[in-house]
Image: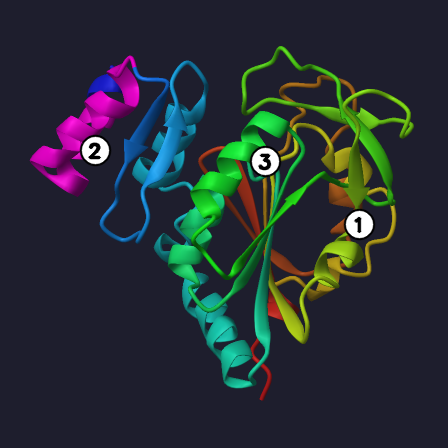
């Protein structure tokens, strides 16, 4: 039934060529499948036999990151325009960017923004670079986001490509990647104002929101997938909710994601 619904979505959004694209994305035997969308200048590359097709469906068919459907969009977009008017750079940080499809959707929504796309897995990161290589306003960054600088390693390398988890490690361990703080990431951009932070890091939110949270009050919108459903009794979301307790925000559920619109930082400067 889900396949039928998705097939209908492809047809409704893209017409007859949408049916051909659906077949290519979901049924092709090729190692790499190319998908073209009319609102993106470059084709998207997907790997058969991975979760790439499901990620594609979530982002471009189910539109789980399409902020325009929410009533808070008008104020967020006004904030974005105001940052541009002040000749500053609207900054989006995509934590757990996978193969770059969420980043592409944010580039579509906010073409004047700079997006930093962070991904720890080498296979995902290679595809991310290929999908984002033609976008001058995107900075690919291989590593993991955390509250402290250090090192991390993937703990479940046999998981599906959208489910990799990382844990803190020593630099001597095989397969380690650096961990970056939000301050590290933001300092890659000159004269920025934060616009949006998307977080889908498979339980790593427990470490990210443990300390060093000065950045949080400055972000107009947090998009986060929480993972208590996947990590029962671990308290993986507890630090996140503690961090929000002194902020005023609108909370919206969008598919697998929770959206937190910060009342104060969404307001446009006079």
Give the spatial CA distance, label 1 vs label 2.
Answer: 38 Å
Q: Secondary structure at mark 3?
A: loop
Whether residue 14 appears in magenta in the rendering, the answer is yes
Which numbered disc flags the more N-terminal residue, 1 or 3? 1
**Residue bearing the label numbered 1:** 181
Snapshot quadrant of residue 59: top left
- Any part of residue 172 in sight: yes
**Residue bearing the label numbered 2:** 9
Give the spatial CA distance, label 1 vs label 3.
Answer: 19 Å
Q: How many C-alpha atoms fall within 10 Å of the one at disc 3: few (<14), some, or many (≥20)?
A: many
- Residue nearest the viewer, comparing 119 with 61: 119
Q: Residue at x 55, y 77 (%)?
A: 83
Front position among marks 1 and 3: 1
Above or below — where is 7 with respect to 36? above
Front position among marks 1 and 2: 1
Q: Residue at x 56, y 69 (%)?
A: 90
Q: Residue at x 55, y 30 (%)?
A: 124
Report the residue that reaches farthest toward the left: 16
Above or below — where is 6 with respect to 74? above
Q: Secondary structure at mark 1?
A: loop
Above or below — where is 203 with respect to 142? above
User: What is the x, y in percent for residue 253?
Assistant: 49, 41
Q: What number is the disc on residue 225?
A: 3
Magenta-highlighted residues: 6-29
Q: How many C-alpha atoms fall within 10 Å of the one at disc 1: few (<14), some, or many (≥20)?
A: some
How is the model colour-coded? rainbow
Snapshot quadrant of residue 166: top right
Number of marks in picture: 3
Which numbered disc flags the more N-terminal residue, 2 or 3? 2
Left of 80 or right of it: where is 23? left
């Amino acid at each position: 039934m889900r396949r039928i619904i998705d097939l209908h979505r492809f047809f409704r959004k893209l017409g007859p060529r949408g049916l051909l694209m659906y077949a290519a994305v979901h049924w092709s035997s090729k190692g790499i499948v190319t998908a073209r969308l009319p609102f993106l200048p470059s084709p998207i590359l997907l790997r058969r036999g991975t979760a790439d097709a499901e990620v594609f469906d979530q982002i471009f068919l189910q539109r789980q990151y399409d902020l325009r459907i929410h009533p808070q969009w008008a104020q967020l977009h006004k904030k974005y325009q105001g940052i541009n008017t002040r000749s500053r750079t609207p900054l989006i940080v995509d934590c757990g960017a996978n193969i770059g499809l969420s980043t592409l959707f944010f580039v579509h929504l906010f073409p004047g923004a700079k997006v930093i796309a962070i991904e720890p897995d080498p296979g995902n990161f290679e595809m991310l670079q290929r999908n984002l290589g033609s976008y001058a306003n995107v900075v690919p960054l291989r590593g993991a986001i955390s509250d402290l600088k250090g090192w991390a390693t993937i703990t479940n390398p046999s998981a599906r490509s959208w489910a990799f988890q990382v844990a803190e490690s020593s630099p001597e361990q095989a397969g380690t990647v650096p961990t970056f703080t939000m301050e590290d990431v933001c300092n890659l951009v000159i004269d920025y104002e934060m616009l949006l932070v998307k977080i889908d890091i498979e339980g790593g939110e427990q470490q990210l929101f443990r300390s060093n949270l000065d950045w949080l009050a400055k972000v107009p919108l947090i998009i986060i997938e929480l993972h208590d459903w996947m990590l029962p009794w671990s308290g993986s979301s507890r630090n996140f909710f503690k961090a929000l307790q002194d902020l005023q925000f609108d909370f919206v559920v969008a598919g697998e994601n929770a959206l937190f619109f910060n009342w104060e930082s969404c307001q446009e400067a006079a």
